[in-house]
Image: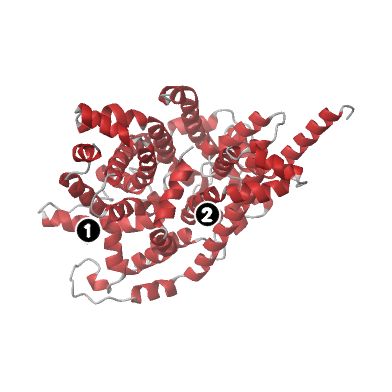
């Protein structure tokens, strides 16, 4: 408080921190603290009745490694991710390229693609459950008309996960389309003219001009798709409840069951740590690897 | 030249056809649900152009579960969350965009953590916290983890940084305080971004499910999504046409809003996505 410039600076700093305080306090309370507390809890037993939680070291992780359902959830989730990510991004790009052109009924087509994004996943799941219903569902009516044998799409472990994946792709593709569309509209139209004068084929133009210029958008969409692959589980509650035989149990759904159906909070904390680790590594990859490569400037 | 470029790269009849086929496929499940909801149960899975139209399914659904209460809860929830997010993130974004202080970068990095590790994942600990605060089964508990939004802070910070500093300084010379400058200069200039964020936030929280499912256990605090799940999952043999009616009913406000303001919706999502 002796030198006035310093006093001014420190006063401004106090003001800045006051502005930040409410948001930061809530973030710490509901994001940072729970993340740390989860890690601590994962080394403790689940408190039951009068018995408080006690230090058990890695026991929860041992339980996890020996839990066949956990591994099934990991396999399912990897399968789900490796199907939803490329499919939804590929379709989104295709949709955006189409809707970006002048064509009959463009607004309607764009609306059809985007509508699933606005609907809640729970409602979407209800609609699709009806779609998949054995015997009455629209899918059965189609396959029946083609003379194919009737089957229980959601009740069969070999098709259930694929059904759940289709719903997620249906919901997400239109959302990602928007970002591609925005990026396409910022591309300079003279690029197209130049390529046409040079006689480049349409595919060549896409591969050598549009695709590289869309790279930052693809990265943004990719990160979102990866996060969603581990976060989108709402539809499981309606469509399959993780069944049949855990064929559609994803990690977050397994976490829900362990934490809030069996109330094994110690083990649930260990699963949360795994999920947080997955998401954190996505963040690190984005920061240190992808961000450096995609910028073409 | 443009004409030539368009003939080479523009939409051919094949593109138009393929785009339309995909669009029809995309809207089919929804169209099927609309058909079922507006027709008597016996036509639920049978297509007949002469089938009579009816609103009975909606009436039955409305009477079968406390949907009015669910609607009220969701509207309140969405409004509370949006209000809190707008106020808190405006203040924080202003500090990040225009103030110089020690620890700024660390604080900003801490904010960005939430973009990756969302409250959706930290269910177990947040449930414990709500238990300690005695908030389990309240609307506040559903909203509280989302009041501070890293996404909103980031978005507004970018916007505020693009506003010329001269405007800020001119207002200061006039004797306005920091908060007055924020309110009179920054907020009005960032209005499109606020609209964009509001639309994204409203549709996200209208649709949010897992956390509300866990933290609520009574009609008084359940939002629509959870109410809908309870309604359609109870094995009480509710007819399909009534379930689809309930489903459409609970999405109707968003759907109608989307159809009316399609352009704004699409542009908002675009704006929110471009960083």
Direction front: furthest residue: B1
Left of A256 or right of it: where is A82?
left
> Residue B215 got which mark?
none
Most foreground residue, A290 or B64: A290
* Tag 1 subunit: A
Q: Nearer the viewer, residue A152 or A146?
A: A146
Q: Give the SS element for disc 2.
A: helix
Crowd class of label 2 (few under 14; some 14 to 19; many from 20; radius 10 Å): many
> Is residue A15 found left or right of B23 in the rendered image?
right
Can residue A49 be seen here? The reply is no
Q: Quadrant of the N terminus of chain A?
A: top right
Q: Residue under circle 2?
A: B212
Residue that sits furthest to the right in the current view? A2
Q: Residue at x 29, y 56 (%)?
A: A108
Q: Quadrant of residue B73?
A: bottom right
Residue B134 seen anywhere in this rendered image of the structure? yes
Residue drawn 19% across the image and 37% down it: B8
Horizontal and vertical percent position of residue B31: 28, 61
* Displayed quadrant of residue A223: top left
Q: Nearer the viewer, residue A155 or A142?
A: A142
* Residue A138: mark in rendering: 1
How busy is the neighbourhood of tag 1: few (under 14 within 10 Å), some, or many (20 plus)?
Answer: many
Please state the horizontal and vertical placement of residue A241, each as a whole percent of the image. Answer: 38, 50
Where is residue B77 drawn, in percent x and y?
56, 59
State whether residue B240 is above or below residue B99: below
């Amino acid at each position: 408080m002796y030198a006035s410039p310093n006093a001014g600076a420190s006063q401004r700093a106090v003001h800045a921190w006051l502005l930040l305080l409410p948001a930061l306090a809530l973030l710490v309370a509901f994001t940072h603290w729970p993340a740390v507390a989860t890690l601590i809890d994962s080394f403790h037993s689940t408190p039951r009745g009068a018995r408080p939680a006690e230090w058990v070291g890695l026991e929860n992780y041992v339980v996890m490694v020996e839990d066949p359902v956990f591994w099934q959830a990991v396999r399912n989730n990897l399968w789900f991710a490796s199907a939803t990510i490329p499919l939804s991004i590929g379709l989104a790009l295709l949709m955006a390229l189409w809707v970006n052109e002048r064509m009959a009924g463009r607004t309607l087509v764009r609306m059809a693609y985007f509508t699933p994004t606005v609907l809640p996943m729970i409602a979407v799941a209800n609609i699709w459950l009806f779609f998949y219903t054995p015997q009455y569902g629209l899918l059965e009516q189609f396959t029946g008309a083609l003379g194919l044998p009737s089957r229980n799409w959601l009740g069969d472990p070999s098709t259930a996960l694929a059904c759940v994946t289709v719903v997620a792709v249906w919901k997400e593709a239109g959302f990602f389309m928007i970002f591609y569309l925005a990026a396409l509209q910022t591309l300079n139209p003279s690029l197209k003219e130049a390529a046409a004068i040079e006689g480049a084929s349409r595919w060549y133009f896409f591969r050598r001009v549009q695709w590289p210029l869309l790279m930052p958008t693809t990265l943004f969409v990719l990160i979102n798709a990866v996060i969603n692959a581990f976060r989108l589980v709402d539809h499981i509650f309606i469509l399959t409840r993780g069944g049949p035989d855990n064929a559609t149990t994803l990690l977050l759904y397994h976490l829900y069951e362990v934490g809030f159906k069996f109330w094994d909070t110690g083990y649930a904390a260990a699963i949360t740590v795994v999920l947080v680790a997955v998401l954190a590594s996505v963040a690190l990859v984005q920061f240190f690897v992808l961000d450096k490569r995609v910028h073409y400037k | 030249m443009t004409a030539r470029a368009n003939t080479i790269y523009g939409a051919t009849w094949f593109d138009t056809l393929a785009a339309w086929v995909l669009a029809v496929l995309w809207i089919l499940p929804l169209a099927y649900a609309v058909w079922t909801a507006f027709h008597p149960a016996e036509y639920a899975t049978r297509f007949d152009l002469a089938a009579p139209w009816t609103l009975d399914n909606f009436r039955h659904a409305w009477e079968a579960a406390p949907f009015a209460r669910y609607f009220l809860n969701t509207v309140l929830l969405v409004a509370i969350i949006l209000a809190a997010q707008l106020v808190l993130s405006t203040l924080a974004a202003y500090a990040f965009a225009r103030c110089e202080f020690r620890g700024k970068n660390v604080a900003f990095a801490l904010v960005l953590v939430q973009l990756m590790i969302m409250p959706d994942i930290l269910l177990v600990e947040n449930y414990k916290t709500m238990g300690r605060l005695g908030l389990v089964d309240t609307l506040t508990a559903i909203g509280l983890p989302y009041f501070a939004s890293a996404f909103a802070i980031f978005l507004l910070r970018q916007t505020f940084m693009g506003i010329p500093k001269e405007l800020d300084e001119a207002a200061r010379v006039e004797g306005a305080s920091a908060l007055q400058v924020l309110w009179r200069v920054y907020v009005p200039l960032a209005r499109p971004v606020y609209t964009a964020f509001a639309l994204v936030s409203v549709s996200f929280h209208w649709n949010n499910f897992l956390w509300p499912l866990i933290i609520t256990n009574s009609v008084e605090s359940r939002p629509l999504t959870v109410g809908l799940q309870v309604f359609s999952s109870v094995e009480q043999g509710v007819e399909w046409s009534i379930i689809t009616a309930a489903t459409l009913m609970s999405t109707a406000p968003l759907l109608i809003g989307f159809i009316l303001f399609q352009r704004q919706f699409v542009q908002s999502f675009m704006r929110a996505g471009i960083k």
